[in-house]
Image: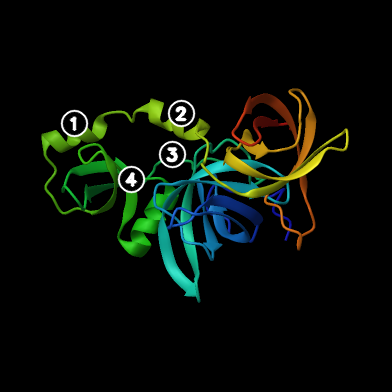
């Protein structure tokens, strides 16, 4: 089914091949190729063998068009079979065009608003939810989000508390944009094997220190120079056909037994 030319304002049920890079529930980095179950402009439902950490950021790459974006883990859906589970993830940049679909906004522009409370401290808020948050809440009765009072990520559930002026005042406060921007630009601390080579024939099987949608940092004992155009295979495995991404080294720094190199992707 060709989904590129379809225009939708709601959920699209379609398997899009993606690569997910992030940390699992044990804090160990992973990369897994899988497919979407469904998606819309603001999020997706994906199927994974690896478990995720609620409110973590993962990188999704559409293997059809090469676009990579950051998504926030909202929560888990049901176990599918074996170790495979479906997860709800929310787009950090809904305008990225990662799905290759031109979405049409809903005519009424209405988003679901529900009364939810922190399961830890019982702080209640009347909150507007994204579509993927709403789906996870309906399916499991819980979503993950930051609680200002607890100052950490907690589970939130539907609340039967009476609406008070204090709750309404707290709910009407605009979200803090600084934390969103930090999340969009932060790098994931991932240690993964990658292959890197330049146009001069220097090649190495190296390790990443961190990655983001804009670039990465890797450690190597080989000599690369600032300004070098390089070709990266991430993650690297001898059993897979290498798919290279073009990058450029923008900085270098000495390490104990090699050098760290900062790379920006060349679109």
Q: Residue at x 48, y 41 (%)?
A: 107
Instruction: Return the disc, 4 or 2, that comes first in the chain's sequence.
Output: 4
Q: How many marks?
A: 4
Tell me where residue 68 appears, x and y as whole percent: 63, 42
Query: Gap in Å between the C-alphas at discs 1 and 3?
Result: 23 Å
State the scheme by which the image is colored. rainbow
Of marks 3 and 2, which one's residue comes earlier in the chain?
3
Whether residue 103 is visible, yes or no, is no
- Quadrant location of residue 151? top left
Residue at x-position 11% and y-position 47%: 162
Dividing the image into 4 quarters, which one contains the C terminus?
A: top right
According to the picture, the residue beneath numbered tag 1 turns out to be 169
Query: Which tag, 2 or 1, sits closer to the chain's start?
Result: 1
Residue for badge 4: 145
Is 251 left, or right, of 9 in this rendering? right
| SS type, badge 1 | helix
Per the model, the C-alpha gap separating discs 3 and 4 is 23 Å
Q: CA distance from mark 2 to mark 1?
A: 24 Å
Task: Kindly identify which numbered label has been placed on residue 181.
Answer: 2
Q: Nearer the viewer, mark 3 or mark 2?
A: 2
Q: Is residue 264 visible?
A: yes
In this rendering, is residue 240 above or below 148?
below
Q: What separation in Å lies between label 3 and label 2 (alpha carbons)? A: 24 Å
Give the number of the disc on residue 109: 3
């Amino acid at each position: 089914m060709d989904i590129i030319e379809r225009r939708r304002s709601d959920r699209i049920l379609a398997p899009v091949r993606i690569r997910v890079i992030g940390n699992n529930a044990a804090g160990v980095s992973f990369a897994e190729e899988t497919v979407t179950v469904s998606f819309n402009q603001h999020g997706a439902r994906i199927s994974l063998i690896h478990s995720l950490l609620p409110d973590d950021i993962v990188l999704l790459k559409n293997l059809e068009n090469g676009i990579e974006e950051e998504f926030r883990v909202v929560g888990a859906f049901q176990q599918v079979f074996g170790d495979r589970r479906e997860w709800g993830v929310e787009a950090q940049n809904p305008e990225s065009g990662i799905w290759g679909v031109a979405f049409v906004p809903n005519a009424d522009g209405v988003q679901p608003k529900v009364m939810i409370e922190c399961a830890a401290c019982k702080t209640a808020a009347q909150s507007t939810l994204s579509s993927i948050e709403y789906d996870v809440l309906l399916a499991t009765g819980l979503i993950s989000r930051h609680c200002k009072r607890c100052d950490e990520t907690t589970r939130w559930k539907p609340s039967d508390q009476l609406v008070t002026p204090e709750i309404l005042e707290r709910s009407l406060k605009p979200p803090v944009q600084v934390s969103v921007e930090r999340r969009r630009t932060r790098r994931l601390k991932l240690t993964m094997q990658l292959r890197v080579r330049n146009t001069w024939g220097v090649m190495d099987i190296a390790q990443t220190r961190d990655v983001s949608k804009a670039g990465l940092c890797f450690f190597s004992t080989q000599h690369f120079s600032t300004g070098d155009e390089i070709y990266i295979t991430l993650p690297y495995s001898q059993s897979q056909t290498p798919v290279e991404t073009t990058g450029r080294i923008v900085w270098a720094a000495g390490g104990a037994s090699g050098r760290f190199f900062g790379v920006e992707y060349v679109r």
